[in-house]
Amino acid sequence: MKLQILSMLSSVSVVSANWARNLNYRSPSEHHPSLGISIHKVVRRNDPQSPWNPAKLNFTHGVASGDPYPNSVILWTRVGPTNDNDKSNVTVSGYVRLYNHDTEEYVSVSKAPVCVEYKIATDKGLGDIVDSGRVYTSSDIDYTVKVEAKNLKPYTTYYYQFNVCDSDNKSPVGRTKTVPNVDDEITNVGIAVYSCSNFPFGFFNAYGNPVRKDSVDYVVHLGDYYYEYKNGDYGWGQSIDRVPLPDKEIYTLYDYRKRIATYRTDIDLLASHQRFPWIPVWDDHEVADNTYRDGMAHLNNTEDSFVHEGGISVDQRKMHAVRAYFEWMPIRQVEMDDNLRIWRSFSIGKLVDLIMLDTRNYDRSITDLYWNTDYIHTISQDSGRSLMGSRQENWFYNQLSHSSKRGAMWRIIGSQIIFSRINQSLTLGDENPLNLDAWDGYQANRNRTLSLLYENNIGNNIFLAGDSHASWVSDLVWLGNKPYDSATGEGSIGVEFAGSAVTSPCPYGANISLATANYASRWLVSANEELQWQDLYYRGYYELHISAEEVGAKYFGLPTVVRRNGWEISLANFTVKAGENKLQRPVAGGVVESGSLKGGKTVQTNATVDTTNGTWFVSHENMEML
């Protein structure tokens, strides 16, 4: 009898929808439950006796997966009555008044929660189901659904789908992949690395190309997934029908939700999320330009900030941004005892430890806010300055040490901003030649990191960076403290691969010519001893292909982003051999397709694209249509 009762209870738990299993009702922080949504209040307001008509609901923004573990992965979707979110939650006669921006009118919708079922299987037909469940969503969390699929096997490909409960209204089928167990031996892994996708500047073709090639296992996004600016302040999207909504600088929770939802209409971005598990981290623009612990470039903790844009304070704006980000991204809750933690790590067998940092929002000392550049230059070497705050910094060093002691072959560090010194006096002038918003503005923090690596003989380090809207490849060196030979790479402790933007414009001008860009790249390479290759011209991405013997980095440039297409150019390929801690010589095989290569040759590209009469003509031998 007891077994029969337990069996009945188990059966009920499978078919009954669950509020708490939808992770988006929870706080982004396990130790700050007050930042979550009160499910008790939501249940009281929502009436399950007035259920939705499944035909009135839509999977508006595809599916996504992320933060893979050996035995679980995060699955995401959004299902609601409109593409827009509920701006008011004002009830009228048992219904919610929801403003539909698609039709520019208020509509009355049922107060019932939306019941959503998910399932994950080993086969495309979803016949061999290994985990499933039912959850609720509602306007309180922008109709998003985020669940943790469990009972999975390490380093295995799975397929998943959502559907409105008890209906044939189904989402697209997504594909995902778990990571290996921490001690598993694996032969290789592929990762696509992105940053800086700005909607009004162009189409996100870069996201779609690895999908078309099916060339990687995972996606790492280093931030600036979306931007907070008003159209016209940074980009003119109306010329290509890419105006980000709402068409103003964003401050409120509704604003951030609407902005990220607009970005998620890009077909190639949707395809990448549907095909690959993502491991994302934010940069500054997911909140605002040049954020730091106490403020941002255009909104600081002053009396004036509380009357700016309807009285939004720095802390309120950050929390709106954080809630929207956690609602919309396939990312786990992260334990955090203080502040807004997103930094975390992933072990990919014995091959890779991936360490994702937050060098922007967590506890960063004051940065360059444009009006204080001289002051930041003065204090850039102050030992009390930190990009990360003491807690994250100590965690980072412990992660590096533990990774080395456990015998992981490679340590890959995802940092939003460029780690290596970059002398940019050609454009910034001789007084302040460094980018003080990057690691160059926090030189003591960089020295502490390099000291740990050199003094403890921790090698095979690969630093990743985005943010700069340009490509940079450098040996990882401690200039002035450790000897370094630029010709051979001897004295390096690793390599840094920094990538260009998906669409955000070249820092030296959105319409820079190829000749001018390559001239500036030649100057930059000559002015920076450890910098081996630099390209300003191309938007794009890079892939890492990692084995126990080597890391290969393949850089791809996009000939145009103002039209959706699948073209790309192979710009340069780099190799780092295990145990050598430097770029293999000759760097990039001695030849690249654009930019400037130290001691090597640049093949002058002529990648013009002619769309006359709707056809493509591309005059470049290394360009291919994917």
Image (spheres, rainbow, N blue to C red):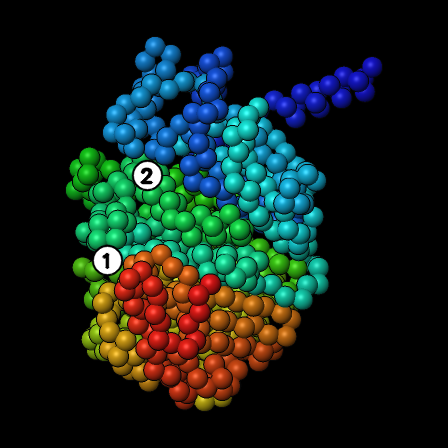
Residue 71 lies, in percent from the top left, at 66, 46
Secondary element type, mark 2: helix
Query: Tag 2: residue type?
Result: Lys
Residue 69 lies left or right of residue 487; in this view the side is right
Residue 442 lies, in percent from the top left, at 35, 65
Secondary element type, mark 1: loop
Identified at 40% across, 65% down, the residue is: 567
Task: From the viewer's side, name the closer residue of 155 and 358.
Answer: 155
Which residue lies most toward the front here?
Answer: 613
Residue 374 lies left or right of residue 3; in this view the side is left
Residue 354 lies, in percent from the top left, at 55, 60
Q: How many marks?
A: 2
Task: From the viewer's side, name the closer residue of 394 and 343.
Answer: 343
Res 420 seen here: no
Residue 514's image quarter? bottom left
Residue 581 lies, in percent from the top left, at 54, 78
Residue 78's image quarter? top left
Identified at 38% across, 59% down, the residue is: 565
- 594 up-or-down from 381: above or below: below
Task: From the viewer's side, name the closer residue of 388 and 316.
Answer: 316
Marks 1 and 2: CB-CB under 8 Å? Answer: no
Res 124 seen here: yes
Choose the circle earlier in sequence order: 1 or 2.
Answer: 2
Q: Residues within 10 Å of mark 2 (few under 14, many from 20)?
A: many
Mark 1 highlights which residue?
369
Identified at 48% across, 38% down, the residue is: 77
Task: From the viewer's side, name the closer residue of 337 and 78.
Answer: 78
Q: Any mark on residue 258, and which?
A: 2
